[in-house]
Image: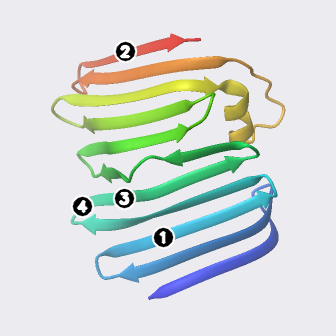
Amino acid sequence: LEAELVTDSIHLFDRDIAESRAAASLTADGARLSLEVQRGPDERYHAAGGIRREGSTFRANLDELGVELGALSYSTTAPAEVVWSDSVLAVRQFELVRRGPDPMRIRADGTVPRSGEADFTVDVDGLHLERLVRLLQLEGVEVVGHVDVDVGVQGTADNPLIGVRIAG
């Protein structure tokens, strides 16, 4: 089964969207999905990937993710995977970057199980807070600054060790 939805000039969740295209291809073991959204001449989003179920475990593959905000362009460097079930959440090789003279990088990788040892890290380098507020479309929030954040989760669910480093 395949489906495609194309819109032109809609208002959704208090957001104006100039154009969008969503496509899905369903199979017996999963789905392939793609999404393209253009809010205006300087704001575009796109994503593509798939999802499949293996018993009680779900696997989502993010083949590509991209955001364009004026002259700023963000994209994933390689396909990433998210696995979740009743017993585990795992993110493998997620990396989103902004290249150029003022680079930014968000990287997440690791596993957080309900039992056993966790090993999960999120590293953020070169994040401009005002750009994050714009991306999240938080009206009325005024934050400025440039930060690097590293978060590590180790240990077990009963005895977690969470380390955070913030520099800015």
Q: Is 66 in front, or is 166? A: 66
- Three-letter residue code for mark 4: Ser
Query: Does dot 1 land on a helix, a strand or a loop?
Result: strand
Q: Earlier in the sequence, mark 4 or mark 1?
A: 1
Identify the residue under disc 2. 163
Q: Quadrant of the C terminus?
A: top right
User: What is the number of the mark on residue 9?
Assistant: none
User: What is the number of the mark on residue 60?
Assistant: 3
- Determine whether label 1 and label 3 are within 8 Å by CB: no
Q: Earlier in the sequence, mark 1 or mark 3?
A: 1
Q: Residues within 10 Å of mark 1 (few under 14, many from 20)?
A: many
Identify the residue under disc 1. 33
Residue extending farthest left: 116
Q: Earlier in the sequence, mark 1 or mark 2?
A: 1
Q: Residue at x 42, y 59 (%)?
A: 63
Q: Earlier in the sequence, mark 4 or mark 2?
A: 4
Q: Residues within 10 Å of mark 2 (few under 14, many from 20)?
A: few
Q: Residues within 10 Å of mark 4 (few under 14, many from 20)?
A: few
